[in-house]
Amino acid sequence: MADLSEQLREALAAVESAGTLDELEALRVRLLGRNGEITAQLKALGALPAGERPAAGKAVNRAKNALSAAIAARKKALSKRRLDAALSAGGIDVSLPGRGVLPGAEHPLSRTIRRVRAILAGAGFAARSGPEIEDEFHNFTALNMPANHPARDMHDTFYLPSGMLLRTHTSPVQVRSMLGEGAPLKVISLGRVFRRDSDQTHTPVFHQAEGLAVDEDLSLTNLKSLLHQFAEQFFEREVDVRFRASYFPFTEPSAEMDVRWEDGGWLEILGCGMVHPEVLRFGGVDPERYTGYAFGMGVERMAMLRYGVRDIRRFFDNDIRFLGQFAP
Amino acid sequence: MKIDLDWLREWCDPQASDQVLADRLTMAGLEVDRIGSGEHGSVVLELALTPNRADCFSVRGVAREVAALFRAKLSARNPPATPATCEARRELRLDAPEGCSRFAGRVIEGLQGGAATPDFIVRRLVSAGVRPLHLLVDVTNYVMLELGQPMHAYDLARLRGGLCARWARQGETLTLLDGAEVTLDPDVLVIADEHQAVAAAGIMGGLGSAVSDRTRAVLLESAFFAPEAVAGRARRLGLQTEASLRFERGVDPAGQVEALELATQLIAGASGARAGPVVDSVDGDRLPQRAPIRLRRDRLAALLGLALPDTEVAAMLRGLGMKIRTLKTGWRVTPPSFRFDLDQEIDLVEEVARVHGYENIPETPARWSVHPAPASERQVDVERIRALLVDRGYCECVNYSFLDKETHHAFHADEPELELANPLSSELSVLRRSLWPGLLRNWRDNRDRGAPRARLFEIGVCFSGQTNEIIEEKWIAGLLSGDAVPEQWGEGKRPADFFDARGDVEAMLCLSSFTGRFHLEAAQHKTLRPGRSVRVLRDAEEIGWLGELHPRLADGGTETMPKVFALKLDAVRESRPAEVVRTSRFPSSRRDLSLLSPRSVPAGEMLEAVSAYGGGFLREVFVFDLYEGGKNLQADTKSVGLGLIFQSISRTLTDQEVDAAVRGVVSLLGKKFGISVRE
């Protein structure tokens, strides 16, 4: 049987060096096929003396099994190589950009309004809106600014021939909400306002966001707490704030809130105060039973601080090179 | 207002640095914009005063505030009374006591021409930003800056008889100091001699009686004009003076004689002139009285969220010049005569908060009794609509609500201009009726900056109706122009067309569960190109438009016009919770029809007819191919590929059933539209 082991060694070497699946298949037929060399060895067993047969049979079968296993392993390897070759030929240039349209952009003022609304919604404020064309009552009188009140001078007002006006702030919505819904109340109004003013830092159209809370037992401490938290959520960092006494006809006590900026200076970001009892009364709310606070901010200013915009007029240029930087 | 710090410290020196002083004032509501420098190295505080603090329009006023905030002493610098050294006097009458309830004055005679204004006065005027003119005017300005009482000096030789304060007569005219002649309305208070008006009271003097270097005798006026008698008039006359600013907001009704004495002292000291007796006409009943205000301890604590010791509160109020009586529940507080802003309990609460310092009030979260309702499913969130357009490549624009008349007429020739009564400029004089003009301009601006492909939209209020009855409504509008997709390797280059715009509109309408209520129908619109526009309907109501802008609006007639759409926002937002129907688990069958149709048959009508006919089993019908104008087609014919999908909810359909339905569809199309199946 010396030539069997020699034969096996040669066959295994041939299997290992088979380069293609076809070659391997031809080899398998030559060795293990019906007329194959190893098959012939099995057939030749019958010619052996009976005493030698079991041992010889065992050897031939072992050789056959070894060879089958080697062929199967080789087949697997060659199949994989063929698949790899096919896949690599089918590769594409994945460095090319994707197909279709990329998103445009939300206007930074909308984005700021959305953020302010979301932060305050988290604190329980519901959004309300009101008309852009207002009357003197809702825009001024009910906000404790009777005719000839000096604070009216600060609101350069656009009038219509009918005597109506373009609202100079979002505060009329406060009055409408109180009259419409009564106390307790927690609302914000966000929208477009108008002042007859146009220069480097003023545009005749701009936006305000304003909040009003009316409930039993609301105090200045609550207002401070809410607005400090608001500033931290808006700027997404811890901020130092300070409340400075100020004057608005519709709140008393009134304050302006400043935020400490990176350069160490204080930047004014909003006006606020306890709702003036006169305003509560105009809103049909009993100021002896309820107290309230209100706050208002310029959306453009908040957006400028948040995004580093230096010129307010950029918001109205509608230059897509500017707008595109606010992609979602 | 600018205040010389040395001058201020003469009145009250809190022993604090300039910066500490400025910070404390700022925190208490007297905002210091800047610590600047004045004349001869002096330091000047630039204050931005709020309109309620008329009492701080002077050095003494700010000093009072400093004294209260620092609990420092206010110097007693009341000028001594100058006894009369001559007999000269003029009568001062209160003919309109509701407007002028105190009119004090005195004659000063024996003035020498050219008497110089003392240096310290010149210095302090310049530091305050006031231009020195000559002694009489400089002194009245100085007194106003120091005490807050505006004064006026009349050249006695140019007055006839005494003076009175009265309302202007109908059509009365006055030539003011600045040379302008104004016609006065009868609600303007004037100072008049026996002959005519010589000053607009509290606003500006007249040219005719103005003092000059040649003035030898002067009548000084130091009056109290009621804020309501002055407010608004200066503005109407186009004059805002230092005097009107103070009178409008409230001048101390107790300070007239004091101011007169200080002026006398300064003028006499500088020129050696003689002073006549002080004439002080007062209508005591009309003079503002400070009524006592009750301040409740509980109320104060409730509003501040902080209980302060009684002694603290009393000390703060006294420091502000108030008279106090302690009550069981709080205090009875009488504010000083110079505080026009204190007449309710809440005003006192603010004073306490201010002096205590807002920074010393803690932060405490509120306990709420209101909680908002969650967003309704019956309305599409505007943010969702905005996000849809942004995701489809649109940039959001924000335009002013006004435009010029020419643009208005280009878009709305038949509709009246909704004009502002007082526009900023002619470019911004008419309220917008549509968002399209703004978007068209935005597109042109961007194109001129080198970005011709545009997807723009805006959400905002537009106005309609008539001048006397303006209706406002929120719209969403968009504009698209340029390539359908940005130039890229994987997609062919093709200009965006009507159907790109229509696709965006349909996507927006799909956000509402009421999709079936929306219809788009071919219709003409003045600013849209004929044959390329549709009206958007919800049920029978017109809610918007979609189309190509009319070439009439083209810039020079050479532009390819953008496609635009506009929809009423509320109409597309209305929605409802989805109402789910059962879906079939049986297979569907598809049949495709290749049809030859007259070109004039709208595909929409074809689809509607088939849907209506298709009965229970037709689940879907759609156009999968459209071909017009090829060489194998007659000019009036188009080739349409129609896809039909059939499915039953309860069983598998047989081929025979489906074929029969298809035959029915073919026969319908033939009869109704003259459409045939392509061989």
Image (cartoon, coloured by chain):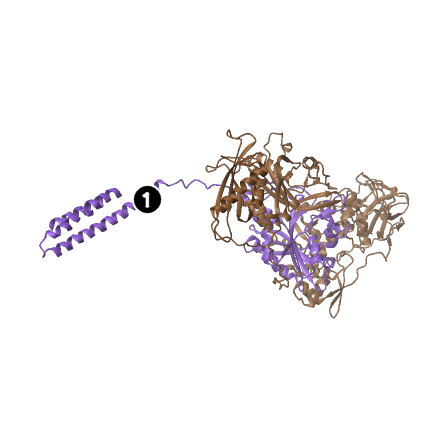
**In the shown orientation, is residue A275 left or right of residue A305?**
right
Color of chain B here?
brown
Give the residue at x 51% y 44%.
B660
Q: How many numbered marks does the figure carry?
A: 1
The chain identifier of the residue carrying mark 1 reads: A
- Residue B308 against residue B174 in the figure, above or below: below
**In the shown orientation, is residue A40 left or right of residue B640?**
left
The one nearer the camera, A282 or B312, is: A282
Quadrant location of residue B236? top right
Residue A311 in sight: no
User: How far across and how far down the image is residue A73, in percent?
Assistant: 25, 49
User: How far across and how far down the image is residue B146, in percent?
Assistant: 75, 51
Give the residue at x 28% y 48%.
A76
Residue B574 in sight: yes
Q: Which chain is purple?
A: A
The amino acid type of the residue labelled 1 equals Asp
For disc 1, the neighbor class at 10 Å (few under 14, some 14 to 19, many from 20) is: few
User: How far across and how far down the image is residue B511, in percent?
Assistant: 57, 49
At mark 1, the secondary structure is helix
User: How far across and how far down the image is residue B284, in percent?
Assistant: 86, 57
Please give the residue where the numbered disc 1 appears in the rendered image: A84
The one nearer the camera, B340 or B164, is: B340
